[in-house]
């Protein structure tokens, strides 16, 4: 099927999140992280039809060729172990991390990480990328625990199972079409779960990446319990005017070459400035989208990731203690 020739579908019918994840799937194909078939199947599931997939592909990758027969099979995005100087191994003696679940509107699964040492620690909710609760994001939770926080990452695919049980096209399709009200309900329930954990004290922080970066901003506008948020390369929520409601001190990290996300930053900054909100942003030179993800060698930029992480910890250290 030649999707490139079927471009009668109007992309105005898709949400910003559908467009965003569709563009990201194409970028992952270009980076050799998904197969041609996985990309096409993902675009169909995101857009809801072959016509929508054709329009997405024509817009995001107009000169994108099918792969040569000799192209190697890409790695499984869910199975690649994190690497790099920020990694906190699963067996780190200072950290306890484990999969957990709790009941809300439905069963919500997730990963909880905390310091082993007795004490009271500020809570941080972590919101995963568009490929679900992968090992890299579990490692981010352990990094927070190592730094003296109690962190929880909800698997936002819990309404349909858990991340490992779904194919990549299913993950992209589910998250691209998830209703914001459903995602926010699951995030609100996860906030309550996290705040109820033994040893939690202080104010609530949220950090998210990619898909989760956008929802970090959305949750900060929606839930008044969020005191500080850190967005890594997430698109500005629509409408941007909703950000006027936030009580959170917001920090955003962007790759300087990430044109599609960076184009949405001015409207975010305008709303926050006009409403006297605390906001700081960094554009990391030499870095693109996903620069913190040390699972993906072609995206990871060590210098930017290390600097952004220290600034993230400093931000939470400033705004989360009681």
Image: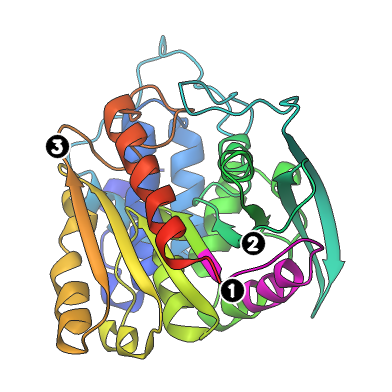
- In the rendered image of this protein, does residue 307 appear above or below residue 85? below
* Percent of width and height locating residue 200: 71, 64
* Residue 152 at least partly seen: yes
By what rule are the colours in the image chosen?
rainbow
The structure residue drawn at horizontal position 16% and vertical position 32%, both measured from the top left corner, is: 286
Residue 156's disc is 2
186 vs 150: above or below: below
Residue 252 point in image, percent of width and height: 29, 58
Which residues lie in the magenta part? 187-205
- Say which mark, if any, is on residue 285: 3
Marks 2 and 3, how far apart in space? Answer: 31 Å
Q: Is residue 116 left or right of residue 103?
A: left
- Which residue lies at the image location 38% right of the left edge and 57% below the top edge? 315
**Magenta run includes residue 194:** yes
**Residue 175 versus residue 275 in the image, above or below:** above
Q: Earlier in the sequence, mark 2 or mark 3?
A: 2
In the image, is residue 161 part of the stretch drawn in magenta? Answer: no
**Marks 1 and 2: in contact by CB < 8 Å?**
yes
**Along the viewing direction, whichever of 256 and 158 lies nearer the viewer:** 256
Name the image quarter holding residue 105: bottom right
Mark 3 or 1: in front is 3
The numbered mark at residue 183 is 1
Residue 306: image location, x then y, percent: 36, 33
- Quadrant occupied by the N terminus: top left
* Local SS, label 3: loop
Q: Answer with mark 2 or mark 1, whichever residue precedes in sequence.
A: 2
Real-space Cα distance between discs 3 and 1? 32 Å
Where 20 sits versus 106, above or below? above
User: Helix, strand, or loop for circle 1?
Assistant: helix
Of labels 3 and 1, earlier in sequence is: 1
């Amino acid at each position: 099927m030649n999707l490139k020739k079927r471009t009668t579908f109007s992309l105005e019918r898709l949400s910003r999140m559908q467009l965003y994840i569709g563009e990201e799937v194409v970028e992952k194909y270009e980076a050799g992280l998904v197969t041609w078939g996985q990309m096409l199947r993902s675009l169909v599931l995101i857009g809801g039809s072959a016509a929508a997939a054709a329009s997405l592909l024509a817009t995001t990758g107009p000169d994108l060729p099918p792969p040569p027969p000799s192209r190697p099979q890409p790695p499984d995005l869910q199975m690649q172990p994190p690497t790099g100087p920020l990694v906190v191994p699963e067996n780190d003696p200072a950290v306890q991390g484990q999969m957990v679940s709790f009941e809300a509107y439905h069963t919500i699964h997730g990963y909880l990480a905390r310091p082993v040492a007795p004490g009271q620690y500020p809570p941080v909710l972590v919101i995963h990328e568009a490929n679900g609760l992968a090992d890299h994001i579990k490692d981010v939770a352990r990094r927070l625990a190592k730094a003296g926080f109690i962190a929880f990452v909800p698997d936002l695919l819990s309404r349909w199972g858990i991340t490992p049980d779904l194919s990549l096209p299913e993950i992209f399709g589910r998250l691209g079409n998830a209703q914001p009200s459903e995602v926010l309900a699951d995030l609100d329930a996860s906030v309550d779960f996290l705040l109820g954990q033994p040893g939690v004290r202080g104010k609530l922080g949220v950090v998210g990446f990619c898909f989760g970066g956008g929802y970090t901003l959305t949750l900060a506008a929606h839930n008044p319990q969020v005191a500080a948020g850190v967005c890594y390369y997430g698109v500005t929520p629509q409408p941007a005017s909703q950000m006027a409601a936030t009580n959170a001190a917001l920090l955003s990290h962007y790759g300087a070459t990430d044109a599609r996300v960076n184009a949405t930053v001015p409207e975010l900054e305008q709303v926050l400035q006009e409403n006297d909100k605390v906001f700081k942003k960094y554009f990391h030179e030499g870095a693109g989208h996903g620069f913190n993800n040390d699972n993906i060698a072609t995206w990871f930029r060590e210098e930017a990731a290390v600097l952004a992480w220290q600034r993230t910890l400093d931000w939470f250290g400033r705004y989360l203690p009681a």
